[in-house]
Each structure stands twice: as structure tokens, then as C-alpha cells.
Image (cartoon, rainbow, N blue to C red):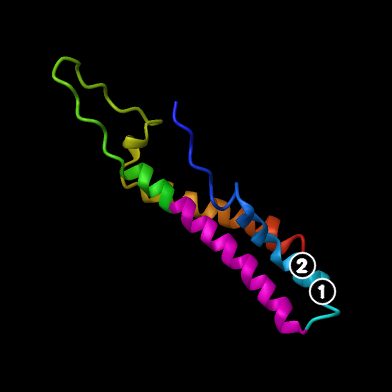
Amino acid sequence: MGQEEPDLYRDTWVRYLGYANEVGESFRPLVPVPVVWASYGVATAYVTADAIDKGRKAAAVSATPSSPPSLSVPAVPLTPVSPQAHAQDPTRVGVAVVDPFVWQSLASVAIPG
């Protein structure tokens, strides 16, 4: 089938911005403290942008209209696993935002530092 578009925040060099705070911490003895805090700002901005991106993608999947049924084939009822069954489901979008934000915050910012 078609090739999926790479995830900007996980499949490209942008991923390494999540570890900017580690670079800041490693240079703490050599640079002013505001530079270290700025590195945490970069890592936090990365985590936030990734979470927003995942939420937008979930909202786009939730809002994707189903294809109109043809006249010759009867319409099949939507199942819970169908993206169309969750049209505008705020819980689904909320989970899509909170999940990566929490895990990326722990893995990239809170625990390594």
C-alpha cells in the first residue's frame, strides 16, 4: 500500500531535542545557570509539541468521515474499533495528548536529569 508519513517528533532528528536538558546538565559547570534552564525549556517544548501533534492526529482520525455507502452494498454498522465510531470523542483525543506528554516528560525530562 502507500508509505506512511514519518512522525516528525519520533522518526527524525527533532527527537533529540527531547534530550536537550541532558546536554545542559552536562555543561552545568561550564555555562551560566540560565543556559541550563533554557535546555530544560527546549526539552519541555519538544514534549509539549509532540503531545499536541498526537492530539491533532487523533482528532483528525476521529473526525474522518466514513465513505458514503454505495447503493448496491448495504451499509455495515460501525464497530468500536473503527475510527469513525469515535467521531469527535474528546476522551480519545485527551488520552492521545496526555499519554505521550506524561511518558515523554518522565523519560526525557524528569527522570534522566
What residue do we see at 67% from left, 57% from top?
Answer: 16
Residue occupying the far left of the picture:
71
Quadrant in which the C terminus is drawn:
bottom right
What span is colored magenta in the figure? 32-55
From this view, report whether residue 7 is shown above or below residue 101. above
| Residue hosting label 1 | 27
State whether residue 37 appears in this view: yes
Magenta-colored segment: predominant secondary structure: helix
Left or right of 87? Residue 32 is right
Q: Quadrant of residue 73?
A: top left
Q: Nearer the viewer, residue 1 or 85?
A: 1
Asked if the magenta segment contains residue 49, the reply would be yes
Residue hosting label 2: 23
Disc number for residue 97 = none
| Helix, strand or loop for disc 1 | loop
Mark 2 burial class by Cα count in 10 Å: few <14, some 14-19, many 20+? some
Residue at image point 81% right, 77% down? 28
Residue at image position (60%, 46%) is 11
Direction from residue 34 to residue 74 in the image, left or right? left
Query: Residue 57 appears at what percent x and percent y?
Result: 42, 48
Q: Position of residue 107 (x, y in %)?
A: 70, 55
Name the amino acid, label 2. Val
